[in-house]
Amino acid sequence: MLKGKKIVLGITGSIAAYKACLIIRELIKSGAEVQVVITPAGKEFITPVTLSALTQKPVVSEFFAQRDGSWHSHVALGLWADAMLIAPCTASTLGKMANGIADNMLVTTYLSMKAPVFIAPAMDLDMYRHPTTQQNMQRLQAFGNHIIEPQSGFLASGLEGKGRMEEPEKIVACLDDFFRQCAAPSALAGKKVLITAGPTYEKIDPVRFIGNYSSGKMGFALAEECARRGAEVTLVAGPVALKTVHPHIHRIDVESCEEMYRAATDCFARQDIAILCAAVADFRPAQVAQEKIKREKDDLLIRLQPTHDIAAALGAMKRDDQLLVGFALETNDEEANARKKLEKKNLDFIVLNSLQNKGTCFQSDENQISILTRQGHHDFPKKTKAEVAIDIVDYVGQVATNKEL
């Protein structure tokens, strides 16, 4: 939703100023137009030449552009912008903004801004915790500004890293989320959504496990899309190397089916919607060796026992005011097998993947799905998993609206 948006990016004198380059890159990649306004102290950390090369616009720093009397109009910038983002924002600039001290171009532009303002603080933890800083942030929030703070993270001392600036991709995601919600009301806005993603690993011994090739990419794409539409997402993730971006995603990392089952069943009652995208192991070793199994024989017999059926368990718990979505990955008789799961597990609809579609499913960045309901099915062409997530969440929104969740 940032395509065509005009963003004023304010940069202050923080060591995190170098991350402004990453913010600019993300904004421009999303289709936004960026105008940088930087404080004199900010130029000590990053050069205007670098910023201008990225934005293709002259960087604004001083009131007067040249010695001939021409000047930069902070009022014009305030009227031009669709949003102002100040990242990083030091404690000094926070104080000036909260108290109207317009002694540089950045604060003057802020005071003239007609568009929404987003602020990403950056300072050491003691400065962040100081009552003056907290009071200034509260005052700025009371004025209608949006404060973007890290949702998690730890400093070397073990203290929660609230003072550091949030990561660039998450800052841009906050702006994208804001404009997405402004564009049109979402059926998912304010809803609580549970998503499972990735594989599970079932231990054989301390170094070996039974698992599958799931990368978690589809589940993570669904989590990001739901969060962008205003949902509060709980993502139960198996062992994957992926990271979440949106700040409204609460991630719970698990390894085994047992751990995923406990996490999902513990929080399901508080959810409006659950999307079960994880590739959960159907079996686990009946006995787990406490030491590494040595190669002593020509063969090894491992007795397996069934794992929890998470979809069936949630289907049995589901209330009329909840929506439950399942996934089916099939190699043969795809639709027939998927429909059996749809009925048996009390799902509202099921998303069918097939290994017959080359270049999709495990490890791939693309997918090709069908959505099956009790009334019929809808086939989709091959797309990126991010685009597939949009299709699935669109359908979730339609069903949720019809059920009046």
Image: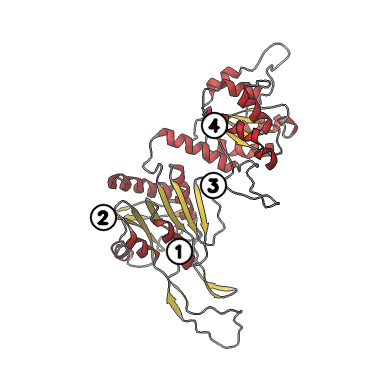
Q: CA distance from mark 1 to mark 3?
A: 25 Å
- Residue 149, percent from left and from top: 58, 40
- First of labels 4, 1 by sequence position: 4
Q: Which residue in the structure is indicated by mark 3?
A: 245
In front here: 255 or 92? Answer: 92
Which residue does the image show at 43% across and 36% down from the upper left?
A: 181
- First of labels 2, 1 by sequence position: 1
Instruction: Judge from the rendering whether residue 359 lies leftward or rightward of residue 110; answer left or right.
Output: left
Work out whether 387 lies above or below 54: below
Quarter residue 71 falls in: top right
Given the image, on which type of amino acid does mark 1 rest? Arg
The answer to whether the residue labelled 2 contacts the one labelled 1, judged by CB atoms less than 8 Å apart, is no
Q: Which residue in the structure is indicated by mark 1?
A: 262
Please name which of the two marks, 2 or 4, marks the residue nearer to the observer. Answer: 4
- Residue 388, percent from left and from top: 42, 50
Furthest toward the left, the residue is: 375
Given the image, on which type of amino acid does mark 4 rest? Gln
Colour option used: secondary structure
Quarter residue 327 falls in: bottom left
Residue 198's tag is none
- Is disc 2 surrounded by few (<14), some (14 to 19) or many (20+) residues within 10 Å? few
- Is disc 3 surrounded by few (<14), some (14 to 19) or many (20+) residues within 10 Å? some
